[in-house]
Image (cartoon, grey):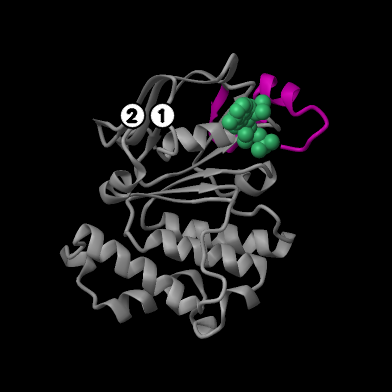
Amino acid sequence: MSAAPPIMAVQNVVKRFGGFTALNDVTTSFAAGRLTSVIGPNGAGKSTFFNVLSGSFPPTEGRVFFNGTDITGTPQHKLAHMGIAKSFQITSLFPKLTVQENVRIAAQAMRSRFGLWQPRSALNLSDAVEALLLRVGLQDRRHESVDTLAHGQQRSLEIAVALACEPKLLLLDEPTAGMSPEEAREMMDLILKLNAERTVILVEHRMKLVMGISDRIVVLHHGTLLAEGTADDIRRHDEVKRVYLGQSV
Ligand SMILES: Nc1ncnc2c1ncn2[C@@H]1O[C@H](COP(=O)(O)OP(=O)(O)OP(=O)(O)O)[C@@H](O)[C@H]1O
């Protein structure tokens, strides 16, 4: 597993909000093709870390690298062009449009903005939209308006929108937030399938969900990197056990 080169790396990342340090000297890297989950208790700095990785805001100190290129402070639209896509807790869909229209708009925007016509993008637009709907299991819902979908289906649609730029790296911030246990399991199945084709970094509050699917887990606590390793490493880690005292990891 350690043989795969990192697709993303952070070096000595610090993020301060005024006098408060939300991330404190975090250094780690993410292997290409793997599924890495970032976990931690409330306020650990997970969302802040996600925002630094996805370019929502730059770190106060430290560097972020993508495929060896320093991308610290690079605007998000450029990151999308480089192959980094993200899906947020906050919805970015057009609720009155259909499932298919939402995906079509995303696919069209990516193509016209970035001229995505490499061989693997050579599908015509309708075929590309159909492939994205199939990928997330929403093909039977294509003509339904977004506001009639179940919450879990809306999250899947957001992922289809994120996939429209054919990312090499997919960043997901709490993709199961607000989901029923059944919806959450389906979402984890979908994430595993997506990981077969690209690197995934997942921020997730519900630790139990990620233990079974992650190649590697990064644990944040009070803005510092507490532990990293396989699910078994994390389960056995004394500090992690202490932090999650009373919770089942
Ligand atoms: N914009 C901000 N301004 C000031 N403080 C912030 C800001 N964003 C986050 N923080 C603080 O940074 C700390 C880490 O927050 P963050 O949202 O990254 O944690 P988290 O691990 O995602 O937590 P949760 O699981 O509760 O979402 C918290 O104490 C939070 O109050």
Q: Secondary structure at mark 1?
A: loop
Q: Residues within 10 Å of mark 1 (few under 14, many from 20)?
A: many
Residue at left 31%, top 44%? 79
Q: Residues within 10 Å of mark 2 (few under 14, many from 20)?
A: some
Identify the mark at residue 72; answer none if there is no mark: 2
Residue 153, image quadrant: bottom right
Residue 156: percent from the left, percent from the top?
A: 54, 65
Residue type pointed to by label 2: Thr
Q: Are marks 1 and 2 in contact (CB under 8 Å)?
A: yes
Relative height, residue 82 to residue 102 (above, below): above
Residue 214: percent from the left, percent from the top?
A: 53, 44
The quadrant of the picture occupied by the C terminus is: top right
Relative height, residue 191 to residue 49 (above, below): below
Total marks placed: 2
Task: Tell which residue pokes out farthest to the right in this image.
Answer: 246
Residue type pointed to by label 1: Pro
Identify the mark at residue 66; answer none if there is no mark: none
Segment tinted magenta in the rendering: 226-249
Q: Secondary structure at mark 2?
A: loop
